[in-house]
Image (spheres, coloured by chain):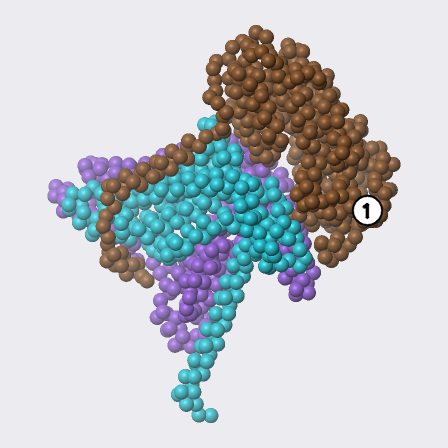
């Protein structure tokens, strides 16, 4: 059977088209599956009391109870939880950026005795299970009377923590050409100026990635907030949500309403900073190899 | 084989060259001299000054507590009275306490079954996204989203979906004509449900795989195609080795993180039913915060560290067989 | 993108430097954040604390006699300063109201109230003790008395009681005994409790059966009624369970009296050994599990998870369950919220092979040894334990005071409101006993609960499971 060139091309296109279609179908199916829990969360959040327990369950609530959000948010001081979480998170993000940048710069650019050793120490701390220090730190915090304050959630993670961020930044800094340093050195710049005027501006993508990663990690923090924050005024969003669960364990519509509100800021921030987030992590994760 | 020097090593020599130009009186390798030049002192001071905040924190919140933790693991301490030295009692107890062993078994199940599944799924989705179709960034965002949601919220949502009477999951089964399951309330199923929940958050891992896949040089896959390799062969012989460092990284991270799972079990099952989801860190938390048995908790923590260490070293050792580095690793 | 081209891209996108001003701004924000983080206040004091405490000459006492007016009119010379009170936060408005009145009657003292839900409370109170920074008055739960006394952190109240002629005899003896260790009283009882059988008027009416009475026995009439009440269905909204058995994690305390009425217990009377696999204990637990798996009158543990037992009960979907006075308030509120007319009532526990038993427990007001203001603390305790305050607490419906004058009055029984037979709560005290609490009791309970899970699920017999638990429990007594 003689095949024309055009026929072969058409066949190839057809196969390609099928393939693309299959890929699209799979991707969409997966996307639907991934988003389903969120949709179900919002659907439940808008249901009237008791309507969660219908059989079979309904997708579209009828009536739609927008008031659930207000009821959920006011039954516990969620505005306080929000403020607390924001405070802790911002303090951590800014503090981490500063300390991690300084440390990463030292490892990448400063030639000091024991540099390799300390860098390996930093890496080693990444492997340390947090529970090792959880017990003695709890005792220390208790004796210091820092329990039920924000201090245990900020100070140790800014000072002594963030090994992963130091690693990311250090790899990135190391990739910045030395010639730029040298040029500044010629002008008489010391390390501090090199860091601020040369390195940091070029490292904005990496810094943004660290900022976003740190933001999300701190916003979602649970275990340490659980251990250290007892008073109602101190609790964070995650703990508040858990509290909600124990107090309103059967009010699924309110629980889902509260969950929606807790989830929204992260999703919003993610859409804003997406570029740095997804690309930056991949880039910094692979560079320096 | 030529070993390419890393950017770092190259930079050092440039630095030295620069310093040579600046300080004419010094020899070619100031490092090797015994006498400390002013520059070296300045470098050292600068280095440690920059490192100081982290170092101070490291001492205060890591090094010293680690020491305290080792000490505590040999004592009996409940916070009210001073610690009482007990020698190796806690460590012996570790191997006799049934809940320690049970929680280790649970955690191992979750880790050794969950991480491979999770990694394969993430890789599979990454391969899917790597096809030349439009709208990748939208899909990538959607797949990433679940991972950034606070664990408490995510767990609550899944608890509701898996509710035996009114949840979506059983509705789905019913629609398929299958009998309803007890999910998180079933001793056999609870862990599997938690593994399933963890896969929902595979976004970040998938993104790393995707970036790695996109970095695989086209010339290699095309060369294989020309040689007649089909898609599967191209994947196994070209793509997979090229992304093996990232696979290795993901697996190590996955194992370390999975071994420390806490929040979903705490929120969804409190370790039940019948301790089926009593994971190691959850039990440690209970021992420390509820029973106030800090000595035993410290011993548990060190056992965990030891296990993770051994596991990681084992993986590193095994990695020589299958991880292919284009560049000699640091 | 290779590393080299990435760097080239960076070099090409060189922008202006980070100026010193930017740095200062960043530092400022971070410092601000850290300052914000560190100066979050601990609790909200009602006014400034601490003038030095003086030795009281004649300490004031709000009267305890049932018929007198509450507050003394004279401003007494007495202890001064801040008094910090910490409890679970239930019936907070009564406490806040009377804290105000206390301060009026005792101008030298100010009251600061802190509260936390149960799980957090238990943790926080211990860390406060450990940090040597406890409140002055706190809610002491019976289950913790031995742990706290062993760690020597409680102040004995005998001297205060003797000095002020405090009428300790007006408090239920069983509850005072709960907080007496080695002859010293460590707490003034706040509340007591008994477990009774709650039954749903709607469910019983729908099934057309007679309500429970004191002729009931667990294995006979109770089981019969539960079977008649139970309706099976694939549609979970059409089901009815005769009895919501107290099974599952965290519920063993409610199952204990049933086990007792079979003659069993999980620990021996002298608390020297576990009796988890005694034949009577096994029999009791097996009977409980059979309700689920054999007679199918009770839902399996967790199958009603995430649903409101109270609502189902009031709607007639659950016939009976085990609870205490605290639930009365919750049920009344739910009835009001959902507009439910048919109510509920209570009945005494049925009898078992070994007789009729129920469980009592209690909590008290206690003073830590390290309290800053023990004198002021004692004044506050006397206030909280006075007739007016206790009456107000009892009137909310959910409180079961250990103070006899109020307990035996209509303020507790509240005729005209459900449950009609509220007297049952008081009468049940006669055959009530507390759990045999000791140092390792909560661990023992956890072992039993975990061990019983497969039994309740129908996968194991109680005998097998409890033999295992007995073995594991041995280490708690060594």
How many residues crowd mark 1 within 10 Å: few (<14), some (14–19), many (20+)? some
Q: Residue furthest top?
A: C57
Q: Which residue is mark 1?
A: C205
Specify whether C337 is left or right of B244. Answer: right
* Front in this rendered view, residue C398 or A134: C398
Q: Quadrant of the C terminus of chain A?
A: bottom left
Specify whether A134 is left or right of C211. Answer: left
Q: Position of residue C420 (x, y in %)?
A: 78, 35
Specify whether C9 is left or right of A260. Answer: left
Q: Is residue B260 visible?
A: yes
The chain letter for the residue carrying disc 1 is C
Corner quadrant of residue C211: top right
Disc 1 secondary structure class: helix
Q: Residue at x 44, y 32 (%)?
A: C40
Colour of the chain lettered A:
cyan
* Front in this rendered view, residue C450 or C228: C228
Colour of the chain lettered C:
brown
Q: Position of residue C69 (x, y in %)?
A: 66, 17
Q: Residue furthest left?
A: B24
Q: Is residue C371 above or below residue C9?
A: above
Q: Position of residue A243 (x, y in %)?
A: 56, 40
């Amino acid at each position: 059977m003689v095949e024309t060139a055009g026929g072969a091309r058409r066949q190839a296109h057809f196969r390609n088209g099928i393939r693309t279609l299959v890929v699209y179908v799979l991707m969409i199916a997966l996307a639907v599956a991934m988003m389903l829990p969120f949709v179900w969360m919002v659907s439940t959040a808008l249901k009237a009391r008791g309507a969660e327990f219908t059989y079979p369950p309904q997708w579209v609530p009828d009536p739609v109870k927008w008031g659930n959000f207000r009821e959920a948010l006011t039954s516990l001081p969620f505005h306080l939880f929000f403020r607390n979480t924001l405070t802790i998170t911002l303090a951590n993000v800014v503090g981490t950026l500063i300390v991690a940048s300084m440390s990463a710069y030292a490892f990448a650019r400063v030639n000091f005795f024991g540099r390799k050793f300390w860098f390996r120490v930093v890496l080693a701390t990444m492997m340390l299970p947090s529970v090792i220090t959880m017990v003695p730190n709890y005792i220390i915090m208790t004796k210091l009377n820092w329990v039920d304050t924000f201090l245990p959630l900020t100070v140790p993670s800014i000072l002594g923590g963030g090994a992963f961020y130091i690693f990311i930044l250090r790899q990135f800094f190391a990739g910045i050409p030395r010639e730029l340093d040298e040029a500044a050195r010629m002008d008489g710049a010391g390390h501090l100026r090199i860091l601020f005027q040369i390195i940091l501006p070029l490292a904005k993508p990496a810094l943004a990635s660290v900022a976003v990663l740190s933001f999300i990690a701190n916003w979602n923090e649970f275990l340490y907030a659980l251990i250290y924050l007892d008073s109602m005024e101190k609790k964070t969003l995650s703990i508040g949500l858990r509290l909600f669960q124990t107090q309103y364990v059967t009010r699924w519509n309110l629980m889902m309403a509260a969950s929606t509100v807790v989830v929204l800021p992260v999703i919003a921030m993610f859409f804003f900073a997406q570029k740095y987030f997804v690309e930056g992590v991949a880039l910094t994760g692979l560079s320096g190899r | 084989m030529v070993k390419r020097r890393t950017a770092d090593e190259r930079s050092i020599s440039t630095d030295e060259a620069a310093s040579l130009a600046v300080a004419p009186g010094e020899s070619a390798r100031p490092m090797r001299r015994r006498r400390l030049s002013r520059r070296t002192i300045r470098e050292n001071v600068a280095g440690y000054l920059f490192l100081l905040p982290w170092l101070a924190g490291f001492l205060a919140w890591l090094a010293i507590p680690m020491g305290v933790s080792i000490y505590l693991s040999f004592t009996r301490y409940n916070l009210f009275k001073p610690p009482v030295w007990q020698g190796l009692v806690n460590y012996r107890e570790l191997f006799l306490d049934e809940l320690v062993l049970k929680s280790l078994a649970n955690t191992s199940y979750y880790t050794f079954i969950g991480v491979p599944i999770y990694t394969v799924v993430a890789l599979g989705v990454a391969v899917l996204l790597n096809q030349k179709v439009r709208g990748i960034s939208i899909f990538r965002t959607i797949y990433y989203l679940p991972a950034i949601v606070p664990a408490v919220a995510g767990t609550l949502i899944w608890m509701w979906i898996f509710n035996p009477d009114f949840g979506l999951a059983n509705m789905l089964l019913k629609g398929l004509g299958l009998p309803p399951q007890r999910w998180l309330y079933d001793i056999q199923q609870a862990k599997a449900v938690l593994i399933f929940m963890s896969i929902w958050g595979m976004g970040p891992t998938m993104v790393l795989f995707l970036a790695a896949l996109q970095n695989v040089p086209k010339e290699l896959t095309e060369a294989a195609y020309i040689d007649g390799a089909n898609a599967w062969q191209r994947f196994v012989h070209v793509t997979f080795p090229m992304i093996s460092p990232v696979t290795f990284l993901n697996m190590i991270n996955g194992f370390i993180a999975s071994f420390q799972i806490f929040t979903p079990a705490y929120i969804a099952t409190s370790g039940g039913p019948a301790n089926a989801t009593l994971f190691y860190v959850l039990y440690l938390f209970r021992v420390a915060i509820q029973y106030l048995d800090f000595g035993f908790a410290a011993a548990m923590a060190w056992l965990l560290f030891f296990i993770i260490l051994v596991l990681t070293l084992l993986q590193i050792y095994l990695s020589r067989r299958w991880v292919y580095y284009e560049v000699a690793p640091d | 993108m290779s590393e080299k081209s990435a760097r080239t891209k960076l070099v090409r996108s060189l922008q202006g430097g980070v100026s010193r001003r930017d740095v200062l701004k960043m530092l400022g924000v971070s410092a601000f954040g850290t300052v914000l983080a560190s100066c979050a206040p601990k609790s909200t004091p009602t006014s400034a604390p601490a003038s030095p405490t003086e030795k009281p000459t004649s300490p004031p006492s709000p009267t305890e006699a049932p018929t007198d007016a509450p507050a003394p009119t004279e401003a007494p010379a007495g202890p001064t300063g801040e008094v910090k009170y910490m409890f679970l936060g239930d019936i907070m408005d009564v406490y806040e109201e009377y804290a105000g009145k206390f301060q009026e009657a005792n101008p030298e003292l100010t009251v600061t109230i802190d509260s936390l839900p149960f799980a957090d409370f238990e943790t926080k109170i211990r860390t406060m003790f450990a940090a040597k920074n406890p409140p002055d008055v706190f809610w002491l739960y019976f289950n913790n008395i031995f742990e706290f006394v062993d760690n020597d952190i409680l102040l004995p109240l005998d001297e205060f009681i003797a000095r002020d002629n405090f009428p300790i005899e007006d408090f239920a003896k069983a509850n005072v005994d709960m907080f007496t260790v080695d002859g010293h009283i460590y707490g003034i009882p706040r509340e007591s409790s008994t477990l009774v059988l709650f039954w749903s008027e709607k469910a019983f009416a729908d099934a057309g059966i007679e309500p429970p009475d004191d002729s009931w026995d667990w294995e006979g009439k109770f089981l019969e009624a539960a079977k008649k009440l139970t309706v099976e269905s694939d549609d979970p909204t059409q089901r009815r369970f005769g009895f919501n058995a107290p099974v599952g994690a965290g519920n063993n305390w409610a199952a204990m009296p049933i086990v007792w009425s079979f003659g069993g217990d999980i620990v021996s009377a002298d608390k020297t050994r576990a009796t988890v696999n005694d034949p009577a204990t096994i029999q009791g637990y097996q009977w409980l599990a059979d309700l689920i798996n054999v007679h199918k009158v009770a839902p399996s543990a967790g199958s009603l998870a995430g649903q409101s037992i109270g609502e189902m009960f009031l709607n007639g979907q659950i016939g009976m369950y085990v609870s205490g006075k605290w639930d009365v308030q919750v049920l009344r509120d739910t009835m009001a919220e959902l507009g439910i007319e048919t109510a509920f009532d209570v009945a005494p526990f049925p009898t078992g092979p070994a007789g009729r038993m129920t469980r009592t427990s209690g909590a008290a007001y206690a003073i830590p040894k390290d309290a800053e203001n023990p004198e002021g603390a004692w004044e506050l305790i006397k206030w909280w334990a006075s007739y007016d305050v206790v009456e107000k607490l009892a009137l909310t419906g959910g409180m079961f005071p250990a103070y006899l004058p109020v307990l035996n009055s209509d303020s507790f029984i509240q005729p005209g409101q459900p449950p009609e037979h509220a007297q049952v709560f008081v009468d049940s005290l006669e055959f009530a006993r507390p759990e045999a609490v000791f140092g390792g009791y909560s661990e023992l309970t956890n072992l039993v609960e975990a061990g019983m899970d497969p039994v309740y699920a129908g996968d194991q017999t109680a005998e097998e499971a409890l033999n295992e638990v007995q073995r594991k429990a041995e280490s708690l007594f060594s």
